[in-house]
Image (tube, helix red, strand yellow):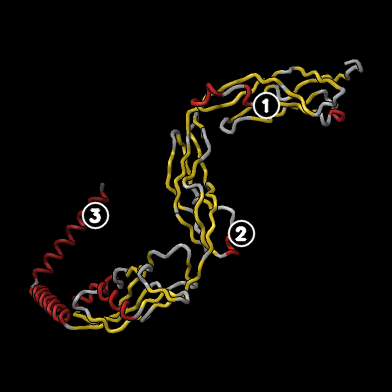
Amino acid sequence: MERLENIKQSFKSIQRKIKVLLRRRQWKEVLIFLAFVLVSFGFWVLQGMQEEYEIQVTIPLRYRNLPPEIAFVQSPPTEITARVRDKGGVLLNYAIANKVSAIDMNLKELHADEGGTFVCTKSDLEGAIMKKLISTTSLLSFEPQQIQEPYSKLIKKSLPVVFNGSIQTEPGFVISNDIVITPSAVDVYASDVTLNALQSVRTAYLEIKKAKRTVSRTVQLEEIAGVTIEPTKVTVTVTIEEFTEKTLEILLKSVDIPSDYTIRMFPSVVKVTCTAPLSRYMNLTEDDFAVEVSTADINRNISGMLPVLLTKKPNWVDKVTVTPDSIEFILEQNSPND
């Protein structure tokens, strides 16, 4: 508290000194002088705004409607540098941003010669630039003065789209069906060498967390150097449902049993426990699973136990466990009369 009080006293002391200083005659004269200087500066600025000057401005170029089956041989220019003249007040608008709004180059309207070159003439560029300038502004020069961009034809191929991402569900929920991508395939344009190396197109990485209902997202496709993809976006749909647990008793099958032998298994029935979406719970039956034991290496078996193998299950069930995971067996040789 004492420190705060000292600060307040110091502040009040400074205030008093400033007031005393401003009451002195010489400081009043200085303030009046500064006021006249500011007014004079304002008049000078206003007069300067009426004078004509020259400046350089940058105008971005954007290319629209490039047909997917062609590609530029090299990167086309992305901006035009123009020298313009106008009054200072007008040029101030250009100078603040140092750019004029972009010129859209509609490639469908540009002339394409037989040699495979897009051409935008000097007069076409000049007309496009003047549309972006204020009416009083004079265009003195600009670079480049014309655009001639060679292009090459590309080969078309349809490729499947592959999901690229991570999906995590809330506890008690599962992905109940295959991930659906629409469209499932896209048209890809590139050189024959590039296309031969491509087998699929991936989506941009999509991460979904704590999902507990069906999710549908529009996702950009991953860009590939030297390749044009049409369309560039797909819709990814992930069906998510609440799940429940179900246990079924499945009869064990044996494979690779010599024809002159019979195997007896203990137990001959195992329990298969899994999680399944609620919508499919009632349709899940014993026929959807297969469990087997194999006696292919029975001669090397010294434990008297065979592992139980799960060889068939629906792809929409999860967390499958088999109990028991191994069984005892007796291998009996059949009598000649059997």
198 up-or-down from 180: above or below: below
- Amino acid type assigned to the residue bearing label 1 in the image: Ala
Discs 1, 2 touching: Cβ within 8 Å: no
Left or right: 87 as drawn, with respect to 170 = left
Q: Which residue is identified by label 3?
A: 7
Left or right: 137 as drawn, with respect to 78 = left
At numbered mark 3, what does the secondary structure look like: helix, strand or loop? helix
Residue drawn at x 50%, y 72% as measured from the top left: 73
- Amino acid type assigned to the residue bearing label 3 in the image: Ile
323 up-or-down from 202: above or below: above
The C terminus lies in quadrant: top right
Q: Residues within 10 Å of mark 1 (few under 14, many from 20)?
A: some
Residue 307 placement: quadrant:
top right
Residue drawn at x 50%, y 70% as measured from the top left: 152
Residue 150 drawn at (x, y percent): 47, 75
Residue 109 placement: quadrant:
bottom left
Q: Nearer the viewer, residue 187 or 252?
A: 187
329 up-or-down from 38: above or below: above
Residue drawn at x 27%, y 74% as measured from the top left: 95
67 up-or-down from 280: above or below: below
Q: Which residue is identified by label 1?
A: 290
Q: Which residue is identified by label 2?
A: 197
Q: CA distance from mark 1 to mark 3?
A: 86 Å
- Amino acid type assigned to the residue bearing label 2 in the image: Ala
Q: Earlier in the sequence, mark 1 or mark 3?
A: 3
| Residue 147 appears in view | yes
Which-is-in-front pick, marks 1 and 3? 1
Residue drawn at x 59%, y 33% as measured from the top left: 315
Residue 327 drawn at (x, y percent): 76, 22
Q: Earlier in the sequence, mark 3 or mark 2?
A: 3
